[in-house]
Amino acid sequence: MQARVIDPGSIRPDPQPVLISVGVMGAVLFTGLVLLALNSGISESFPYFFLIPWVAALAVVLLIPSAVLWYQGKFSFDNPIVFATFSYFFPAFVLGGFALAAGLSQPPFLSNIQDAPTNLPFTVQLIMMGFAGLAVGYFLPIGKKIGEISSRFFLKRAYSDDSYLMPGLVLLGIGMLNSALSLSFGLFGFQQATEYGTYDGVLFLATLFWLEASFLLWYVVFRRHDFNTKSYITIAILVVTSVAKALFAGNRSSLLQVFFVVLLAYVLSGRKFKARQYALATGLLLVALFVGMIWGTTFRAVKGSEDRVGASEYTESVFNTIDKLGNDNGNSLLGSSFTAFAERIDTLSSVAVVVSNYEQLAPFEESYGLDNNIIRDLETFLIPRIIWNDRPRASEPRKYSELYFNYAENSFAITPIADLLRNFGVIGVPLGMLILGIILRSIYRALVEDQPRGVWRATLYFMSLTAVSYEGFYGAIIPFMFKVGVTAIIGLTIVSVLAKIFDGRRLASAS
């Protein structure tokens, strides 16, 4: 029997023990530093130093599902759990939690948190429970099974990628036109309409064609193996229109939305992330965060309020903001924007306000129209406002802000976790998030997981995934996902009809 010779160069060490060892060493080192700080005077300079161990534990909980997916070889940024973790939960509660603990975030409503040493850690525990429920719902087989059944009902025919370019540009133009119209009605940008008309909701949803078309065009561009003149022209149009939209949106997250559009289009198109892509994505993310924060903060200061104004006056505010940015001192602007960024990224404190006050304020919610908002929104969302013009809106951000923050001129973050707590108590948090996890897994399985790539599936999935707001009301998630889904299907139908025409012309010319 001949002995087998093993080439030493072919032996590859298993990275798992190394990663586990590094993780354990990091945890031990962090614990040691915290204990050392507790026995020194450094903790006195941190207003909420007791939060640090809790936020660190939260970070571990948030990263576990992504680590499991990585171990299974299924880690991807388009996965709903991964996307939720890194687009919202980790920055809002871990980075934001550390900003709060260090005193970098000091929002004026901190005084609304009663018994902070008790309620802040309890808030972190609720977030752990909520995210754990979301993850469990995702990994349960029921969502995967529902997705498998649902996948049979989606279109499988696709036209050539080039056939979607012109239809995508047409849909982009329709979205831009509706956005311009919405701007004059106070439905777009940094302004708030005092009254809502019967067709305002339809007009607002039509503005989403801009977002849908942007993703579709980036997707088509990334699907090409090599770029040509059409690709570069399309990219130029997308960059110009995205910058214009960010300028007129007047908020701090518009550029961040552009980043996620490009990121998800890149991943869903089938392209892979390597070291170069990770470095480029990290750089673009930082630029989107800080430039968006500077622009949004300055624009709101220039415009002054969310009062509805004419399109010409609103446009004048955009140019005035550009002038102000060009004339202001860079250091002071960067400093004020960093402070605003720290407060904006901290969602932990606003959730803690609800956690510490929801039982006391429960008797007053009915007078504000907020009682049982989840059930009431789910019962009525299928009836269009065109049919029921006086349909009540139970999940009303301004009423919520007035009751819990004593300030109705701003929309403070509530998150699905706090909304579930208000409606159903502590037990409702993991159960409600578990249901959401099942829904997300079913959509992911039906449109992406083990499915052929195509414009229809990718675009519909993108619109559904980004329709979930982890900063808003739980009761608004399913109604808004439904409306966005219908809007996305209408947009895709328009694109498909035009693509059939362009594809037919291409085939005719080829023959």
Image (cartoon, helix red, strand yellow):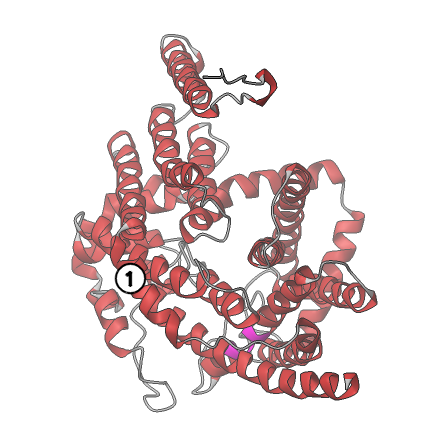
Residue located at (61% from left, 51% from top)? 297
**x and y, in percent, of residue 87 in the image:** 49, 48
Q: Position of residue 348 (x, y in %)?
A: 38, 41
**What residue lies at 40% left-to-right and 54% top-to-bottom?**
470
Res. 368 image quadrant: bottom left
How many neighbours does mark 1 have within 10 angstroms: few (below 14), some (14-19), or many (20 or more)?
some
- Identify the image quadrant of the C terminus: bottom right
Callout 1 amino acid: Lys
Q: How many marks?
A: 1
- Decide which of 374, 351 is in the foreground and name it: 374
Residue 304's x, y, as percent? 60, 60
Q: Is residue 324 above or below residue 104?
A: below
The rendered magenta stretch, by its main secondary structure, is classed as helix
> Is residue 289 shown above or below 149?
above
124 in relation to 397, above or below: above
| Residue at the disc numbered 1 | 145
- In magenta, the rendered stretch is 204-209
Q: Secondary structure at mark 1?
A: helix
Front-most of 203 and 258?
258
- Tell whether position 387 is magenta: no
Seen at 42% across and 53% down, the residue is 80
Where residue 160 appears, as percent x and y from the top left, is 66, 74
